[in-house]
Image: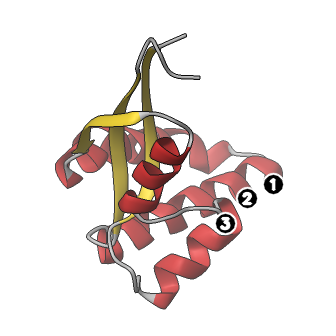
Amino acid sequence: PGGWLAISECHWLSNKPPEAARAFWQASYPDMTVVEAGRQTAQRLGFTVDATLLLPKDAWLQDYYHPLEARISEIKPTASRELRDIIENLEREIHIFRQFGDSYGYAFHIFRRPLDAV
């Protein structure tokens, strides 16, 4: 039967992302695609694309990275070796975003499958 599907997905915003950003995300999310590829996948699966909205760059900073940096500052001095490894990766991610955040971002997709879809 039909229905709605709403997902958020990290996408490349460029067909040729900077090498440093590509290398970072290759390790974390090797299947990351451009926005249009995500839309095409949904269409291939029988969905129509009702909307695609890009999360503003400021939302990454204000709502995610700034609070994350504050928390890192609190816990880093007493972090275990394992936690320091995680922190270092998060700090790399923040650095990559500050340098190359225009080349990738989160898209919020709203897809619909008609009631008569097979």
Q: Earlier in the sequence, mark 3 or mark 1?
A: 3
- Discs 2/1, front: 2
Residue 15's tag is none
Q: Secondary structure at mark 1?
A: helix
The numbered disc on residue 30 is 3
Q: Is residue 37 visible?
A: yes
* Spot occupied by residue 78 in the image (x, y as percentages of width and height): 67, 44
Amino acid at the residue labelled 3: Pro
Which percent across, then down, holds residue 20?
Answer: 50, 85
Mark nearest the camera among 3 and 1 is 3
Q: Nearer the viewer, residue 90 or 24?
A: 24
Distance between the alpha carbons at the discs numbered 3 and 2: 20 Å
Look at the picture and state if 103 lies above or below 79. below
- Could you tell whether 68 is left or right of 83 in the image? left
Q: Which residue appears at 70% of the width and 45% of the height?
A: 79
Instruction: Please name the residue shown 18% across and 49% down the image.
Output: 58
Mark 3 or mark 2, which has the lower sequence index?
3
- Tag 2: amino acid: Asp
Quarter the N terminus occupies? top right
Query: Which circle, 3 or 2, is nearer the viewer?
Result: 3
Task: Assign the C terminus to one quadrant of the image.
Answer: top right
> Residue 96: horizontal and vertical position, in percent?
43, 72
Circle 3 crowding by C-alpha within 10 Å: few under 14, some 14–19, many from 20: few
Observer-nearest of 78 and 99: 99
- Circle 1 residue: 81
The residue positioned 31% from the left and 69% from the top of the image is 98
Apparent side of residue 76 relative to residue 85 in the rendered image (left or right): left
The residue wearing badge 2 is: 85
Label 2–label 1 contact, CB within 8 A: yes
- Residues at marks 3 and 1, CA–CA distance in whole angstroms: 26 Å
Horizontal relation, residue 86 to residue 70: left or right: right
The residue tagged with tag 3: helix, strand or loop?
loop
